[in-house]
Amino acid sequence: MSATLTIERALKNVDEAVERVLNDQDQRFPEAASLGDTVRQGDVYIQKIADVTATPVFYRKLDNPKFPYQLAPGNTKGSRHMLEHADGVTVYALNIKEVAPEQAEDFQAIRDSVATLEEEMAKFSRALTGETEDQARNWSSGSRRVSDEIANVLGFCGPIFNLTKETKISHPEHGDWILGPGSYRIVFQRTVDTDLQIRRVFD
């Protein structure tokens, strides 16, 4: 009997601890974070990167983005991951065609949208693998596999932004993240459905 009570008490303690967690509190991206480290805000990940020059052919600088700038596509409350202000902020978007809102969860539609970068991905992949253009035409070539992996990754990447000043990414449900100067990339959460299709996760 006492063991049962102990388990019940332990579960109650867990419930009480969860209730004390405030999901809407401001959080700060760690100053000690290394390149590649990420934090999560709902269905998006904010990743610290070197800068956009590592993948210049895949992104374009936005000249006059409207602020607050929405980092995830959609018009729902859950999609409102917002860069608060333009002060010290430079935004880069992927050079891909827009995916229709009704196809936003369809991985193949996302993957097809990245096909507009096929030539750039091929060049980038050949540079990484050291293969010639003739060698890369082989279906089993290393550069072709690299190019395919790049397409899969880019299909779930959002904008890159460079900050020269501290700024905030706000969200109405998941709390705000305060980011220091540096470069960051938005990565969308994905899942594999029961039909083994890769899809974006949405709040």
Image (cartoon, rainbow, N blue to C red):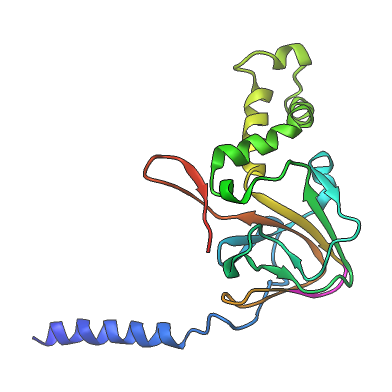
Residue 174 horizontal/vertical position (percent): 57, 74
Quadrant of image for the N terminus: bottom left
Residue 115 appears left or right of 175:
right
Residue 41 seen in this snapshot: no
Residue 195 seen in this snapshot: yes
Tally of numbered discs: 0
Residue 175 horizontal/vertical position (percent): 61, 78
Q: Residue at x 57, y 46 (%)?
A: 103
Q: Is residue 165 within the magenta segment?
A: yes
Q: Is residue 90 within the magenta segment?
A: no
Residue 108 lies, with reference to residue 63, above or below; the image says above
Residue 71 lies, with reference to residue 86, above or below; the image says above
Q: Residue at x 91, y 56 (%)?
A: 63
Q: Which residue reaches farthest left?
A: 1
Magenta region, residue range: 164-168
> Residue 144 sits in which quadrant?
top right
Residue 47 horizontal/vertical position (percent): 68, 59
Residue 156 lies, with reference to residue 88, above or below; the image says above
Relative depth, front residue between 92 and 26: 92
> Residue 32 sits in which quadrant?
bottom right
Residue 169 horizontal/vertical position (percent): 71, 72
Residue 75 appears left or right of 63:
left
Residue 20 lies, with reference to residue 144, above or below; the image says below
Q: Residue at x 56, y 67 (%)?
A: 42
Relative depth, front residue between 72 and 125: 72
The secondary structure that dominates the magenta segment is loop
Q: Residue at x 64, y 74 (%)?
A: 171
Relative depth, front residue between 180 and 169: 169
Residue 77 appears left or right of 67:
left
